[in-house]
Image (spheres, rainbow, N blue to C red):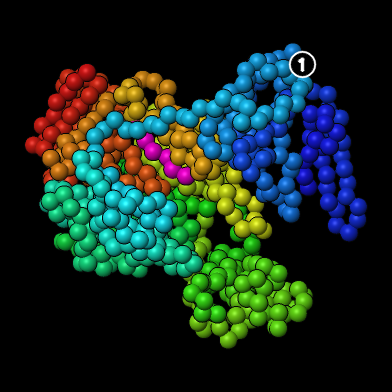
Amino acid sequence: MILADLDNDGDLDVVLNNFNTLATVYENLSTAPRIQFRLVAKGANTHAVGARITVTSDGMPDQSQEIISGGKYLSSDQPIRTFAVATPKALVDVMIEWPDNTISKHAQLSANRIYRIHQEQTETTNPSNISDTDPSPSLFMVWNQAFEEDPDANLPDGISLQQWKLDQKPPKAIDEATQSSTGPMALADIDADGDLDLFSGGETPPGKHPLSAPSRIFLNRDGQFIYSPAWSSPLQSTGLVKGAVFTDVDGDGDPDLALACEWSPVRLFLNHEGHWIDATQPWGLDAYPGWWQSIDSGDFNNDGKIDLVVSNLGLNQSYQSLESDEISLYFGDWNRDGRLETIEAYADSSGTDHPISNLTQLKTLFPFIHETFSTHRSFATATVEDVLGAHYPDYQKRLARWPASTVFLNQGKTFKAVPLPMEAQWSSGFGIASGDFNLDGNSDIALAQNIFPVEPSSPRSDSGQGLILLGNGDGTFKALSQEESGIRNSREQQTVALEDIDHDGKLDLAFKQTGGRVQVHRNQSSPSGIRVHVFASEANPFGIGASIRLGHEGKWGPLHEIHAGSGYLAQHGSTIVLPQRPVPFTLKVRLPWKDEESFVIKKPGREIRITPNQSVSIGD
């Protein structure tokens, strides 16, 4: 099925390709007022695929559509976009975000017109970059010499992790160049020496999915990061790491490591006497292998224990049509060409795995199977072992059975899995972040959504707009509608980060979009809260790893932590925003590797600063 304006009257007609008969064409006879746009971008992308059109007019809500190519079964709509207009005399303002991220604006356009807009004939602007105002001693970057070369930088070939101190040039490599990408990174003082150490997650080497490079720990030694075999050894087989956060899960004052992994359970490593203990199985996380994409932590039931929130594929994807509780991924290199070929499979009632892909799709990867299956009928009941034949013993297997984005509530020595509300499952989750957005004393969740790159046989996951989940303080959440949250983002949202950008005592949101601008949402809820800053040491000036909890009249709110790295490739601001409470109220404060102390706050104020000796200063 496709949509196209076949008669150039500004509305969309419908064409159906029927099976074994003639196609059907339905003419749209609507007389409602409308406006239509046809874009011509610079260069070879003449139909401006990837551009986004946003229109505003009186009497109608803001409307936004993207020009896409394909995405339907063996078909693609005409690359035009039609919008509703309230009255024939209404005037329309339009903003176009072109595929190269430039923007053009056109005002006071008349309704009932078709507009063809050429990018080369319009004035475009580049959106301003948004940066955090906090100073930072180092910038970590992944450098690929194949894409950008500087003859003076003396950088290694391949992909290398670099440390770039802001007062130095060029950057310094802190590991050897490899052919695999670097995954998520996070910082914490894991060895109790007062400075911040670095975790670097393992990503997939080219052609080796779902294998991953080893995850690594780099210890901070006088400002330089040195690879630590001892700390890294337990992380060698963590799997394909998509998200990481240092968080004190067991409440003993040191940072533990929680990882979101694809085709794997969420992994948990407890920091114990100078080494990692793999606590994935003891804490019950091994029962939930999934397609985990990002991870953050928070206290979602106000019990003073750190919980985890992890994004996943959701419950609105093609696997849900299979009557199977378990999806498997077989992988191996049957032809010894150095690249792994994979087969996704579902289990029948007897536990036998059958391929999900059809015969035509599998023949492209395994051309030898035409000798075994000459017809689709013969393939219909084939098992994975039948397909692979003599190669079956050489193939490895990963499995996943839990697609829901989930909160794992900390029960003390184990986790209880609670799926997020259904609104969070309608599309795949990417970046995730927690904080108290409405300052009601409960931890909330922001979720970036959508995954566009999919196999040709699968529809892309694009029903998410970006989601706010308000916490109820008991581990459950209420999803806000787009009208309630003000967030409407139909692009592929990768990352969401939190920071009080305008210093008004409210957490703001920034969404990173694939191939688009960073979209910043200012928090306009009221009233403002208390901004809390922690200075742990000269080597840890932003208090990374510190935790804070507010109590008033015997009732305690959630435990908050300061992280450096969490979600999906995200870095939140280091300012904690707490709700205002009548004085006196109490703050429980724990700096990294220190004992918890309580402070009674008797003076009202909008800013609280905590220093290394755990003294507290209050300001406006």
Tell me the amino acid under the disc marked 1.
Pro
Q: Would you say 532 lies left or right of 1 here?
A: left
Q: Residue furthest top?
A: 89
Residue linked to disc 1: 88
Magenta stretch prevailing secondary structure = strand
Residue at image point 32% right, 46% down:
565
Q: Would you say 49 lies left or right of 166 here?
A: right
Q: Would you say 65 lies left or right of 482 here?
A: right
Residue 578, x across and y down, in percent: 29, 29
Residue 122, x across and y down, in percent: 60, 26
Q: Nearer the viewer, residue 271 or 129?
A: 129
3 to 363, vertically: above or below: above
Q: Quadrant of the C terminus?
A: top left
Q: Residue furthest front?
A: 151
Residue at image point 45% right, 35% down:
518
Q: Residue furthest bottom?
A: 390
| Quarter of the figure with residue 617 | top left
Residue 609, x across and y down, in percent: 18, 29
Q: Would you say 232 lies left or right of 341 here?
A: left
Viewer can see residue 114: yes
Q: Nearer the viewer, residue 122 or 252?
A: 122
556 to 294, vertically: above or below: above
In the rendered image, residue 447 lying in the magenta stretch gets the answer no
| Mark count | 1
For numbered disc 1, what is the local secondary structure?
loop
Q: Residues within 10 Å of mark 1 (few under 14, many from 20)?
A: some
Viewer can see residue 347: no
Please give the range of residues in magenta: 493-499
Residue at image point 66% right, 30% down:
118
